[in-house]
Image (spheres, rainbow, N blue to C red):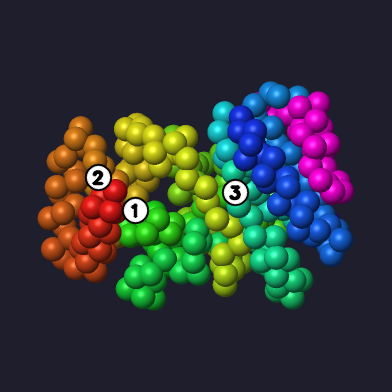
Amino acid sequence: MINFVLLTYSREQQLKNFFQLLSDSKIHREIPCRLIIADSGSRGKEFFEKIIKEINGFKIKYKYLATNANDAIENMYIVSRKHYEPSFYFHDDDKVKWGEIKKFIDKYSKIRFSYGFCFKFGTKPKPIYSFYKHKAEELKIALSYILSHDGNCPLISGVFLSSPKEFGSIYQNLIYGKYKDVDLLMYIASQSKFYIHPTNYINYHENYLSDNKIRHLLSRDSLSQFFKAKGEPEFLILSGLVYWGYKERVVPLLNSYIKMIFQPKIFLLLLIKSFYRMKDLVAK
């Protein structure tokens, strides 16, 4: 049985939209599946039962869990300890393409892997991959987070874990702050049983509460130290570039600019990102 874990905190309309899309997909008719509602907002089982009753044709088996987690990664961790496997993990504001999920599951039945995920809006975050064909996957993930020109960075939402119990040992060692997902996905990408689905099966819904909209200097410091500890020249540059827009950390940002003299590919990626940012500002 495939488990669809829904990580939810406070959003209601997006929650209804998620339930309706899932119901309309009829995926439960094609594959054995179950919905796990992981509620970190302490809203109670009755709250979700009321919403589900309003959803037209909702026939999917579901289980409610009150996790009281502090963030989405902790929510994932708590659910993983319940040993629902294999599992997809989604947020309540995700726009899931359930037809593509079905293809993913069909592929999974033929190849065995422990972890899988898609990118935001496309197969590969170009030009990142074209520049770094022979580099480790975890570096590509890091570059995509910091230097993607079109927001096409990998998401923790939509991640697939065939054996969620493995997540426990990973969680205990994740970095501090809002960028635990970067650490987690880089770890996943470094594993031998890792797979990126050839087409995206989820569209991320941008909103004002998204972590990438919220500034948090201590979290950036933690991410910077995490990159710095990797030791490779590209990671050392990224350890300073994470402070883009943070006036409190101008010196490490300038140091990274200087180091880019010896890493022209990263400099070109930064130029491309800057060009698209300016283009977006002009369009507004």
**Residue 88: assigned label:** none
> Where 207 falls versus 108 (above or below)?
above
Task: Count residues near mark 2 (Cα–Cα under 10 Å), then give few for <14, some for 14-19, many for 20+.
Answer: some
Q: Find residue 244 and name its label.
A: 2
Q: Quadrant of residue 126?
A: bottom left
Mark before the other along the chain sequence, 2 or 1: 1
- Of residues 40 and 26, which is closer to you in this image? 26
| Foreground residue among 15 and 103 | 15
- Type of the residue with mark 1: Ile
Q: Is residue 266 left or right of residue 84?
A: left
Provide residue 86's location: percent of width, then percent of height: 75, 55
**Position in image of residue 17 (x %, y %):** 67, 44
Q: Residue at x 13, y 63 (%)?
A: 261
* Structural distance between the alpha carbons of marks 2 and 1: 9 Å
Judging by the rendered image, the residue that carries numbered circle 3 is: 94
Residue 80 seen in the current view: no
Q: Quadrant of residue 44?
A: top right
CA gap between label 2 and label 3 equals 27 Å
Q: Please provide percent x and percent y for residue 281.
A: 26, 50
Secondary structure of the residue carrying tag 3 is loop
- The residue where tag 1 is placed is 146
Secondary structure at numbered mark 1:
helix
* Mark 1 vs 3, N-terminal side: 3
Magenta stretch?
46-69
Q: Are marks 2 and 1 in contact (CB under 8 Å)?
A: yes
Residue 214, placed above or below residue 127: above
Q: Nearer the viewer, residue 172 or 249?
A: 249
The percent position of residue 130, horizontal first and vertical second, equals 36, 75
Q: Secondary structure at mark 2?
A: loop
Left or right: where does residue 274 sit relative to residue 46?
left
